[in-house]
Image: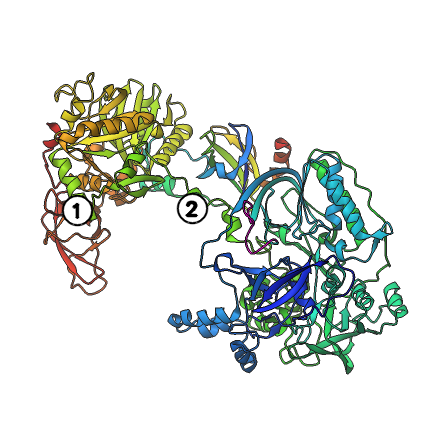
Amino acid sequence: MTQRNRLDTGGRIDRGTPLGFKFNGQHYQGFAGDTLASALLANGVDVIGRSFKYSRPRGIVAASAEEPNAVFQLGATEATQVPNVRATQQELFDGLVSQPTSGWPGLKIDFMGVVGSLLGRMLPPGFYYKTFMFPQAAWDTYEKYIRKAAGLGRSPRKPDVDTYDHLNHHTDVLIVGAGPTGLSAALSAARAGARVILADEQAEMGGSLLDCTDKLDDKPAAEWVRGTLQELAGYDNVLLLPRATVNGYHDHNFLTIHERRTDHCADHAPTNLSRQRLHRVRARWVVLATGAHERPLVYGHNDLPGCMLASAVSTYINRYAVVPGRKLVLMTTNDNAYRTAFDWQDAGREVVAIVDTRAYATGAWQAEAERRGLKILKGMAVIEARGRQRVTGAVVAGLTSDGNRVTGDRQILNCDTLASSGGWSPVVHLSCHTGSRPVWDDDAIGFLPGKTVQQQLVAGAVNGRYSLSDCLTDGASIGAEAATKAGFPAKPATVPFVRTRPEIGAMALFCVPHPKPNSRAPKQFVDFQTDVTAAAIELATREGFESIEHIKRYTAMGFGTDQGKLGNINGMAVAAKSLNQTIPETGTTIFRPNYTPVTFGAIAGRHCNDLFDPIRYSAMHEWHVRNGARFEDVGQWKRPWYFPKADETMQQALNRECLATRESVGILDASTLGKIDIQGKDAREFLGRIYTNAWAKLPVGKCRYGLMCKEDGMVFDDGVTSCMGENHFVMTTTTGGAAGVLEWLELYHQTEWPELDVYMNTVTDHWATMTLAGPNARKLLAELTDDIDLDRDRFRFMDWRQGTVAGVPARVFRISFTGELSYEINVQANYGLHVWETLFDHGAKYKLTPYGTETMHILRAEKGFIIAGQDTDGSVHPYDLGMSWAVKEDKPFSFIGKRGMKREDCVRANRKQLVGIKTKDPSVVLPEGAQAVDNPDHPLPVPMLGHITSSYYSACLGRSIALGVIKGGHNRMGDTVHYPLADGRIVEAEICNTIFLDPEGERQNV
Amino acid sequence: MFYLFCPYCGEHREEEEFHPRGQAHLSRPEDPDGCTDEEWGDFIYFRTNPRGLHHEIWVHAVGCRKFFNVTRDTQSYEILETYRMGSAPRITDLNDKQQSREVQA
């Protein structure tokens, strides 16, 4: 297909570089410098999608971020799919493949088209809620098809092939938007030496200057842009970011910029380049020079392809050398849009008429139009467009001077393009992101940025100064002000002189009236992307919605990915009129980040896979991998879970590990347990306050188990703390709780007891810890040390000794989490692997067996030892655990948790208490979380007694064992309870003591 | 994303280095065992949730590990002052905002 709408000359495209691309399965050609939208228009593609609700044919309306219809799915392969791309913002590249996201099953034959035209009147706002939500269960079915037909794009099903990154910046002045305002602001700030970031969403900086026919200093505007950019690029203190949308304005002047670095190059990024980058900027001062979007007028069938924004038509002609039609009717409320008719005429096409809604329109622009021989219909408006797949005519009628009613006869003008301009809507989005509400301005006929607590200035069109010369002047002075406030005294840059015609006042008109009431008139679209009509908004107000925020949610106005950039103000105007209010009384909805859609890739950056969350490895990790360990994640740690041999199942491996440990000797890598070094002359007092038990008399060389509670009396961590010296202790914590415990200790030290002389620091990573457990532990350890006396009576249970193990300095703790004779060897982490391997060199004759966390869990459960966080859940106090021995109530200081566990609820009978559970059938292992009931035949709801917290098969006991909580369990020993399971089985079990093995503790005292 | 001045480090740092620990200036009762259940319940569970000025504790978790106080406007998210543990806030009324800006400048 030829580019039938392309002009032979002009524009900022390179006719020498043709680019092939695909849209909806068809091949087309465009030129370098095109956007996907301009290339489609050049090829005369009218229908680019179907609308969301009514499935009406839609065409391209705008030329930049506000485009509501041309939202496409891009990507030549599954892995490079990108949904939600605005064709107006996508630069064309050779081989680009795009699909409409709407219009399933096809642009020409469509499913909703039938529904839409037959049921049009039956699809009022809230239709989906009202109709499809019942029955609830069927929504899943409806939703699938509605979504598919509505066209919301889809995510790729294969991993993204590209990389994305993040960059952090600090800057003095961040200028958002590189149009005339932003460029002159940048000049002022840059010349003063301030660090400046100038970001613009387009490939080329210059904004409206790139398609403007006005002369700056009597030269083409593009020349001034070129010179300005050249100067800015020469400053070391300036960072120019084209193709970079400032998407979010967050608290304390933190802004995020989404830069599309290579989206214009190919389907995926060139090697060694990231595709997109998220800049995270902390700016001293921000200048918003975001400009304004033209506001379309609302009239009947205004969504037909061929209905466009006036300024967009000019942009396509001047910047891309594309005239999107043959015969133009222009409707305007202001002088500015006359340019479009002139541009159209200069491109050699027919201007049928300029329909000016103002009867009073007599000024320089009208004089120029008349000089050019153009017909102006004053005090008139287009009340509806005619056509099916494309505009074929415009119905024009007279308008009362207040714009509220249609008068006089109607006439039909033949045309294929209907451009409209209702004035400008300042792009206030970013100014709203931190909570500031925009304020209506009657002169600007739009909302302007409101008061803010941010260090933010606004300049140019976003502040209601629409004329080019105002933008340049305002930009220069605001840029200077921002630099000055940031500490760089600056003078406004001199700005070029703009030769233009004076404008007369615009008319505040939003929705063109129709002879019929809006509810019966042809559909007048306010929000194209969500298919919201003026009638729908009126209906919402009739149904009682008065707040604009509620109207928005009920009608879905502004809910699309375009966030109502085009339609919101018109919608508010319609609502205001319907509510008999002014627009400021009705107010505006608020815009939130992001300004335009951001890909997940850019948000994630490099924080994916291994870099998403740090992984911590013990010093012996390499050995574990070599020996076939299966790993489990505990917090950020990779811990060996079990060490299967050749064909072993998990249970077989666990049985073998458990038996080997109990029969001879096993070894566990316990390095991940949290270790906190605590020193200071009040360290002992401090321990007494944060643990529930006594620490006053623990001698040097001894260890003690402690329970830690929160102020509510509930257990939150436990571990063994050892006395290294009179004022020196080493505390161990659970693996996952280490950081939280340290912060807890610091909190109490810093906020409640700063008078205590105590210091603490984490030493978790400093030590490699290996636990030898089993009857042969002593014999094995004896082979590796000659300076630690391992005699059973001189190095007793709960003692620790310093010495040498395998030739390196070590701390050895005789503590046991298995109930076996056990030594915990701690060496400097760098020596960990050496000591571990030396143990294995000597351990073969004892069948030294490595075991992982699962065997550790089984062995400790056999002994009834709890795991904080597994057998406790924040609602369990020490007495519930049957651990009153670990609470010393008569300590002089009221330790943390003491008062809490005396509360009425904590001392009531029938609390859930930790008990042992033995299934009647020893081969059945209850699932953790199973709920106990007394009588499974009890009518629903069955009273619940408590749940299983830990459950395993114990090879040593030849049966299953479990720990669980049962209401009043401590007094129910021997009772039978039932566990109804999800699969329908009901498991009978007996309540027993938590200690299943060696209740006297003989094994660890050998 | 907040930009917080750590009164111990003496620098503004990014929010990622900190996390909040709730309402400030709560002190643990001197004699917990003498408290009624209601008093103890108030201490451990009840917190204010003002719209406007709020004193709260933050911790420089991946910095100096110090806890400090922040006076913040919960509506605008302005940080009006940060100050060390054990000292009193200078700003106790949102009308003093202006004064705080001068102090921080």
Position of the N terminus of chain A, as image quadrant, is bottom right
Res. A652 mark? 1
Magenta segment range?
A265-275
Judging from the image, what secondary structure is the residue with disc 1 in?
helix
**Mark 1 to mark 2 CA distance (whole Å):** 32 Å
Horizontally, is A107 left or right of A581 in the view?
left
Residue B35 in the image, given as x and y percentages of width and height: 33, 36
Along the line of sight, the residue nearer the viewer: A900 or A754? A754
Judging from the image, what secondary structure is the residue with disc 2 in?
helix
Res. A774 mark? none
Along the line of sight, the residue nearer the viewer: A985 or A710? A985
Q: Residue at x 67, y 53 (%)?
A: A202
Residue A272 belongs to magenta span: yes
Res. A609 mark? 2
Residue A611 can be seen in this image:
yes
Give me the chain letter of mark 1: A
Position of the C terminus of chain A, as image quadrant, is top left
